[in-house]
Image (cartoon, helix red, strand yellow):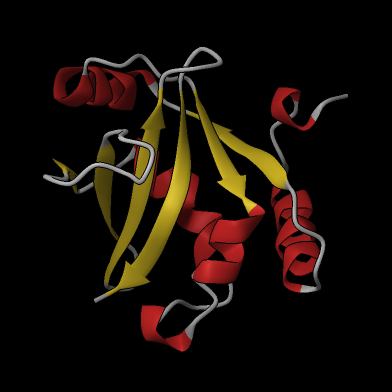
Amino acid sequence: MRWYNHVLTKDELRQFIFDVRSGKISNALIGIVSNSTKKIIREKTGVDVSKIILEGSSVIHINDPKHKLETDDLEKCVEVINNPVSVTLSTEKSKQGLDVLFFEGDINGKIFFVEVVHKKFYGFLSLKTAYRQ
């Protein structure tokens, strides 16, 4: 089964993060976008999305202490995206010229997941960065 056809369980996500931090760079499908969030994304970007992916390079990037993330904060990504306090469209595009959305959550304080909106492969979000305030 290809990685983009199987949503990781919580245990598989923990193992994926461990593997990436141990040097095995890959990608993973971590969730499905809820209908309410699909509507918000469509209104803000005009793009239909269905999946949430996590790229190994993003896991490495946010491992820096300056992001103030707890060990299990990445496990909250799908929850925050599907039940956000707010969603803001960035004024800046990604390096690839794609829209970027800030998903704010309130889980033990403010947490932000910054996602790039991809049109290809039926639309998906990929984590650019994450941080706590």
Q: Residue at x 82, y 26 (%)?
A: 2
* Res 111 → quadrant: bottom left
Left or right side of 105 for 123: right
Name the foreground residue: 80 vs 2.
2
Name the foreground residue: 120 vs 76.
120
Quick one: which residue is furthest to the bottom in this view?
Answer: 65
Name the foreground residue: 59 vs 7.
59
* Res 9 → quadrant: top right
Residue 103 position in % (x across, y down): 27, 48
Q: Residue at x 78, y 50 (%)?
A: 12
Residue 1 position in % (x across, y down): 88, 24
* Res 109 → quadrant: bottom left
Q: Residue at x 32, y 44 (%)?
A: 94
Left or right side of 124 for 9: right
Q: Is residue 122 above or below residue 78?
A: above
Quick one: which residue is furthest to the right in this view?
Answer: 1
Left or right side of 85 for 83: right
Q: Is residue 53 above or below residue 57?
A: above
Q: Is residue 80 above or below residue 67?
A: above
Residue 117 position in % (x across, y down): 37, 32
Residue 120 position in % (x across, y down): 49, 17
Instruction: Please tell me how many numbered marks the rendered image carries.
Output: 0
Q: Residue at x 77, y 55 (%)?
A: 11
